[in-house]
Amino acid sequence: MKKIESTILIKGRGAQINPMTRFDLVERGCFHAEGIDDWEQLPRKTEYIYNDTKSLVNKVTSPDVGMLYSANPYQGCEHGCVYCYARNTHEFWGYSAGLDFESRIVVKRNAPLLLRRFFEHPKWQVQPISLSGNTDCYQPIERQMRITRQLLEVCLAYRNPVSILTKNSLVLRDLDLLQELARLNLVSVMSSITSLDERVRQKMEPRTASYSSRLKVVEILASKNIPVGIMNAPIIPGLTDQDMPRVLKAASDAGASWAGYTIVRLNGAVAEVFKDWLYKSFPERADKVWQAISACHGGSVSDSRWKNRMVGDGKYAEMIRAQFLLFCTKFGLNESKVKLETSLFRRPSTGQLSLF
């Protein structure tokens, strides 16, 4: 029986559908137009699932992501970015990569305790810990839970370097900690800025900070001598790639020292979620965008090849890369690399730990 799909956009959400997970045996949804259980069209209130997990820090084995260890205090992300690669990981929690990902958020309450235990392990060889390697550590629930702030406090106590990637201006709440970490060269921050078109952002990243707010974050951090850069990512060919020069100039003007980029890839369930959103949100250019994404990944929107998967290949991808290098040079970005300090690590006494 064919499932009936609505053409009405769900406001405040990126995903417009809630597809089956790879582990589901039974499909759910509306199969009759007159049915009263058209649950996907009802307003979705965000649900928080509080979890005391057994581990927090993950060793990153992928050679092309620029980090060795990541820690994510939250799984799922209320920001709702429709292209997010992390959507696939929500299936391992028993939830869909669609609406579930942005409306059912797993909160790791014991994350600060786990990070302290991790640093106490005698075999730990100091490396930067990346927050938001999967989902945003400053998503809305952080205002209440303050887990990310506690993780920064632990990093400061142990003098372990930490890096942050976020789309939320809430990072400025922790300016005091970031300044203390920066004084010891223990922190770097990146703001993800996909475009400068607010109309696109409101549909594509519905619960994130505005682009002007993100640039203000860059400006304030830079003024406080906190190393800050941006990720112009992901580039969506035919939708946001034309904004790259403006994004890089605005970032440089705000005080960013470096920039990076990726080209969108739509692995697993993300492809279905993104395609549904694309044809509902931008029907007049959806075909062009879908074909352009495919052109960057060897004819497929899904790409798992090391290195290629992040920046694509083919003429379109080469053009994007050339443009990125040109404008980074023009605007003085990436003239030097940030290398965080790893020699200051220490294990505080039991008395100091009790402060947490």
Image: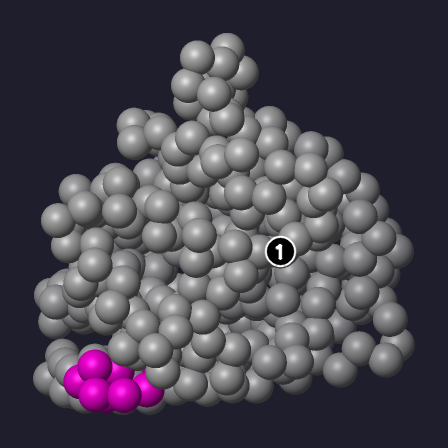
Quick check: 306 left or right of 15? right
* Segment tinted magenta in the rendering: 312-319
Residue at 48% in and 36% down = 2
| Residue farthest front in this picture | 1
Residue type highlighted by circle 1: Thr
Question: Which one is in front, 215 or 90?
Answer: 90
Residue at 62% in and 37% down = 27
Q: Is residue 137 magenta?
A: no
Quick check: 315 left or right of 264? left
Can you give x and y, in whole percent of width and height, for residue 272 in the image? 44, 52
Please tell me in which quadrant of the rendered image residue 76 appears. top right
Is residue 265 placed above or below 178 in the rendered structure? Answer: below
Do we see residue 53 in this rendering? yes
Can you give x and y, in whole percent of width and height, for residue 98 in the image? 50, 43
Can you give x and y, in whole percent of width and height, for residue 234 in the image? 33, 65
Which residue is disc 1 drawn over?
A: 89
